Amino acid sequence: MKARVTAHSRYTISDIDNRLYGSFLEHLGRAVYTGVYEPGHPQADESGMRKDVIDLVRELDTPICRYPGGNFVSAYNWEDGIGPKEDRPTRLDLAWRTSESNQFGIHEYADWAEKANTEMMLALNLGSRDLDAARAFVEYVNHPGGTYWSDLRKKNGRADPWGVKVWCLGNEMDGPWQIGHKSAAEYGHLANETAKALKAFDKNLELIVCGSSHSNMPSYPQWEATVLEQTYDQVDYISLHMYFENYEKNTAEYLALPEKLDRYIGTVSGVIDYIKSKSRSRKDVKISFDEWNVWYHERENDAKRMAEWDWPHAPALLEDIYNFEDVLQVGCILNTFIRRSDVVRIACIAQLVNVIAPIMTEPGGDAWRQTIFYPFQFASAFGRGTALQLDVDCPTYNADVASGVSYLDISGVHDGDSGTLTFFAVNRNGEETLEVDLALERFGTAKSVEHTLIKHDDLEARNTKENQNNVVPVKGDGATLADGGLSLSLPPYSYSMIRVQL
Ligand code: AHR
């Protein structure tokens, strides 16, 4: 099968905000306990942080990490996680029917984030609590000193404020499953009043208001319109979430789902423009896509186990083991974000460790890379710069979720500083190799090209504790410099990264 792509140095979409490669750590399952934090583990440092996990997170180079939830945050008392560890209370976590020991709180998270070289993005509880708890937390975290909350932080061992910039005003407040779920009008009012208070404290904070939990929600997209109408001038981003599943084991349908993601972003972008005009505002609100990933492998098992268990602490939960097919999906999702980087400025893979995550750990044992680690790592490392508006001419197929799905899913990024062009390409055709003629216009001379390939004969192939390197990237031989561009040969069902030195 043949395709033609044209990249032109002046046809650009946007500069990419590096926070497009953000991540998420929730108090859920083994994400925190035996994930990032495991005192007594042979690899634990003096604070109990697993150095093997920190090394893998640093490999992903995720610039920002959302914490502490997720559904967990909507009944969380942040004060439970400060002060001497022996005095911290154990509480029930109503979201996941578990117990929370609070041995890991904001001080431990800040310590870990610094070691993992990632910026903190904090979520506030607007479910069971309100603006008073939120303003106290922000003051505790960000005020230099001389007040009750900031002096308490100092007493607890942290002299300097952490200066956290990005704050989420609750989590998935449109969802009836959320503790303290609200109607759009109720939530919009609370979010606006909370945002006003936080901006009175510091007008430079970046605030994220909750949009829809997914685009099948009955309240979507009216939720976005109602909430933004009340909050537009106080907030900077609206949050969207989407998880991808393949229960039917239909690869063509599954790989078409990013088209739905694209429509979702387009629709909410339209709602933002509508409310901007309606409120005669001059400022822009952007999208923070702060939960996305594949999530279905263990979902039914988890629901059964949760219904039966007796409030365990840090049980295995949402431990999806990803396969090679999910590499293709994650590649297409990241391509969608790059192509929409003018409006999606922050995005967070959900989540980071053990819980629907690129990194897995064994308590007391190894840490390893899941299959989806690699497309995320490549996008994070080489998807920084300017997103290119590519012209793509490729045969398509029709799926239930969308018509005209291109067999070639591709994004391009120009990094002017290093003089490189990077293309991320997924061949969605399981039968045929895609022969791509990629024209490069007005970039100057291409000096060399490198091809990195992820391909496996078995779509179900996984990386497990016993077989950690079953699905790994290899050096490909499918990219050559051709007259004025590149000639690519992309095998059936494959993920490729093509890097050109200019
Ligand atoms: O990431 C898992 C869960 O998915 C989060 O806690 C919640 O926000 C979403 O529904």
Image (cartoon, rainbow, N blue to C red):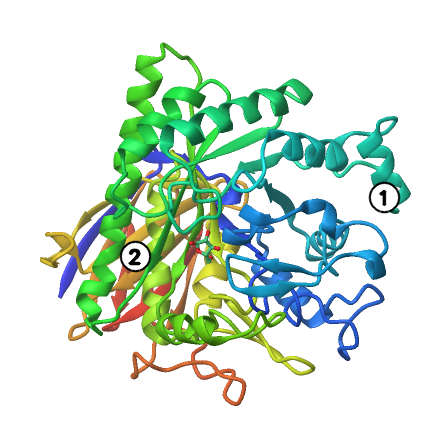
Q: Nearer the viewer, residue 383 or 268?
A: 268
The disc at residue 486 is 2
- Amino acid type at mark 1: Arg
- Amino acid type at mark 2: Leu
Q: Residue at x 65, y 79 (%)?
A: 363
Q: Which residue is mark 1?
A: 158
Are there few (<14), some (14-19), or many (20+) residues within 10 Å of tag 1?
some
Relative to residue 354, is residue 283 depicted above or below? above
Which type of secondary structure does the marked residue at label 2 adopt? strand
* Residue 258, position as x, y percentages in the image: 27, 53
Q: Nearer the viewer, residue 216 or 76?
A: 76
Looking at the rendering, in which quadrant would you find the N terminus?
A: bottom left
Q: Nearer the viewer, residue 353 or 412?
A: 353
Query: Which sits earlier in the primary sequence, circle 1 or circle 2?
Result: 1
Q: Nearer the viewer, residue 129 or 321?
A: 129
Q: Mark 1 and ligand 1: say if the CB distance to the nearest ligand atom is below 8 Å.
A: no
- For discs 1 and 2, the disc positioned in front in the rendered view: 1
* Ligand 1 - quadrant of the structure image: bottom left
Q: Residue at x 31, y 72 (%)?
A: 325
Which type of secondary structure does the marked residue at label 1 adopt? loop
Spatial separation of the CA atoms under disc 1 and disc 2 = 53 Å
Outermost residue, top side: 280
Can residue 139 be spotted in the picture? yes
Relative to residue 276, is residue 451 depicted above or below? below
Can residue 235 be spotted in the picture? no
Image position of 128 (left or right of 58): left
